Amino acid sequence: MDFRISPAEQDIQTRARRFAREHIAPHAAQWEREEHFPAETLRAYAQEGLVGLTVPKELGGPGASTVAYALSIMELAQACSATAVTVAVSSMVAEVLSRFATPEQHQRFLSPLLKGDFFAGSFALSEPGAGSDAASLRTSMQIDGDTGIINGEKTWISSGTHAGVFVVWVRDNGEGSRGISTVLVSPEDPGFSVGRKEDKMGLRASSTVSLHFGDCRIPVNERRLSQQGGGFRIAMTALDGGRIGVSSQAWGIAKAAMTALRQGLQEQRGSLIGEERAMIAQMETELQAAYGLILRAAWLKDHKKPFSSQAAMAKAYATETANRVCQQAVTLLGEEGCTQLYPIERLLRDCKVTTIYEGTSEVQRIVIARSLMRA
Ligand SMILES: Cc1cc2nc3c(=O)[nH]c(=O)nc-3n(C[C@H](O)[C@H](O)[C@H](O)COP(=O)(O)OP(=O)(O)OC[C@H]3O[C@@H](n4cnc5c(N)ncnc54)[C@H](O)[C@@H]3O)c2cc1C
């Protein structure tokens, strides 16, 4: 078994780390305070060729591995978890486009996303009343000649204020998961508008909004990503890969908390009592276990082996570990841990949602159990 990452993967990790340390980390606390979406920084990151890492070279992407992608998100999240989630969602959208879009759609939507001409891409699946149970979504699309007319609402959509392309799931083929199709929506499409911005406990530099479709008209033949009724499979495939991104994000948050904790303890007192030693040793062990799960899921995906259950394990374990690590880091630093003297209070707030989006921990356990029972 070879645990080394390849020189190409190492190169991506180094480039992401350098960018994150120079251009993101110094501003993360301020962006969070001011709820600033770092559009120009995201553009510069894309111009470095680091968005949509897994998009093949023949489609204008970097053609990197999922392992490299996971390592890059870990680096970003150590600097700013809000930036990490924005890049992770854009990269998920880029991967969906690379796999399912036509050459014309690549040119119109994928290419600007990879080059930074779009600040971000959005993945619009969730609705009021359709979160974990995405198959019950109600946003509808009716066909009138060459026009698709979309009506409904999406909620909790990351980057919705700045996205240049929205991958949207609509119902156009009856009830259930087979009634769902996937289409591409541009922010300029008539009848599309961005609604309420969520006032979140963390990740405040990432915008999370509702989207309104009021007789939103799209040229449907140019914008279909799936066959009629074939959209649900695209969502599930994308979420399997997306979970590697979220677990990497959570891992980066926890790693940043460990770094800040070490620094804080050295500043406070320089030595640990027995119980504290045991606590910190357990935190680091769990973090390393999460790292192994994440990279194993990424490796399986790269080697075209089934990875859905492994990605679900990585997500449930890494996100819950990250929450435990951040909580315990605050505990170990005492009252100072609750202040902005250290970034840990921000990391703790940022961390919670990683157990929720792209499938809650409960949903991950359903995926794992189903796969076990099928085996
Ligand atoms: C910051 C943020 C960003 C987001 N970004 C996006 C985005 O970009 N695009 C997008 O489409 N969505 C996005 N979401 C939505 C997210 O994916 C949903 O919140 C998530 O899927 C959970 O859905 P829900 O909130 O409706 O919870 P619900 O589905 O209502 O679940 C509520 C609780 O019930 C539990 N539960 C539900 N069903 C079961 C079950 N069968 N068995 C056991 N327990 C169950 C859940 O685990 C949870 O604890 C985002 C959410 C947040 C918080």
Image (cartoon, rainbow, N blue to C red):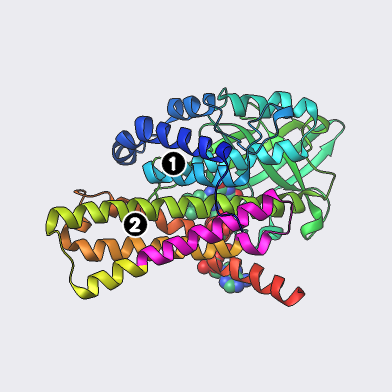
Q: Amino acid at mark 1?
A: Leu
Q: Nearer the viewer, residue 208 or 197?
A: 208
| Residue 354 coordinates in the image, percent (x, y) | 48, 56
Helix, strand or loop under label 2: helix
Where ligand 1 lies, by image quadrant? Answer: bottom right
* Quadrant into which the C terminus falls: bottom right
Q: Residue furthest left?
A: 269
Q: Which label sits on residue 76? A: 1
Helix, strand or loop under label 1: helix
Which residue corresponds to the image point at 24% horizontal and 66% vertical from the top-left?
331
Q: Which residues are magenta?
A: 283-311
Number of marks drawn = 2
* Quadrant into which the N terminus falls: bottom right
Q: Which label sits on residue 140? A: none
- Does 349 sit left or right of 367 as displayed? left
> Disc 2 or 1, which lies upstream in sequence?
1
Local crowd size for mark 1, using a 10 Å CA cut-off: few (<14), some (14–19), many (≥20): many
Report if residue 76 is visible in the image: yes
